[in-house]
Image (cartoon, grey):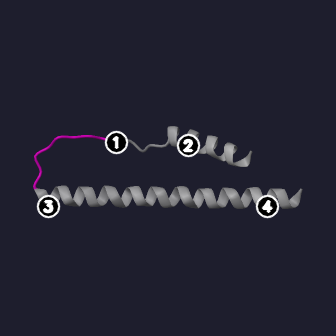
Amino acid sequence: MIDKEYNNILKKYHKLSDRHILVVETDMPYSVVLKVVNLSDKIRKAGNELVSLIRKNYEQLLRTKRYRK
């Protein structure tokens, strides 16, 4: 039951988060394209890390609440 609640909350978060896919055509040198792709990859990894930290803290909060009951 807790997993279902968590997944529903996670789905709501993903719907409200500002992560979007943007497709753009432009004339940029290849070196600039590589920099942009590298930066977007770093942003994606940071977002994934943030979600995992939130998940870990949320699970710890639930464990603490169960313990206190």
Q: Which residues are magenta?
A: 21-29
Mark 3 to mark 4: distance in Å?
Answer: 50 Å
Magenta span contains residue 25: yes
Q: Earlier in the sequence, mark 3 or mark 4?
A: 3
CB contact under 8 Å: marks 3 and 2: no
Report the disc number at residue 31.
3
Identified at 85% across, 61% down, the residue is 67
Mark 3 to mark 2: distance in Å?
Answer: 35 Å
Q: Amino acid at mark 2?
A: Tyr
Q: Which residue is mark 2?
A: 13
Identified at 10% across, 46% down, the residue is 27
CB contact under 8 Å: marks 4 and 2: no
Q: Which residue is mark 4?
A: 64
**Image height of 57 relative to 17, above or below:** below
Position of 45 with respect to 51 (left or right) is left
Residue 55, x across and y down, in percent? 61, 56
Mark 2 to mark 1: distance in Å?
Answer: 16 Å
Q: Amino acid at mark 3?
A: Ser
Around disc 1, counting alpha carbons within 10 Å, would you say few (fewer than 14), some (14 to 19), or many (20 or more)? few
Mark 1 to mark 4: distance in Å?
Answer: 37 Å
Secondary structure under the numbered disc 3 in the rendered image: helix
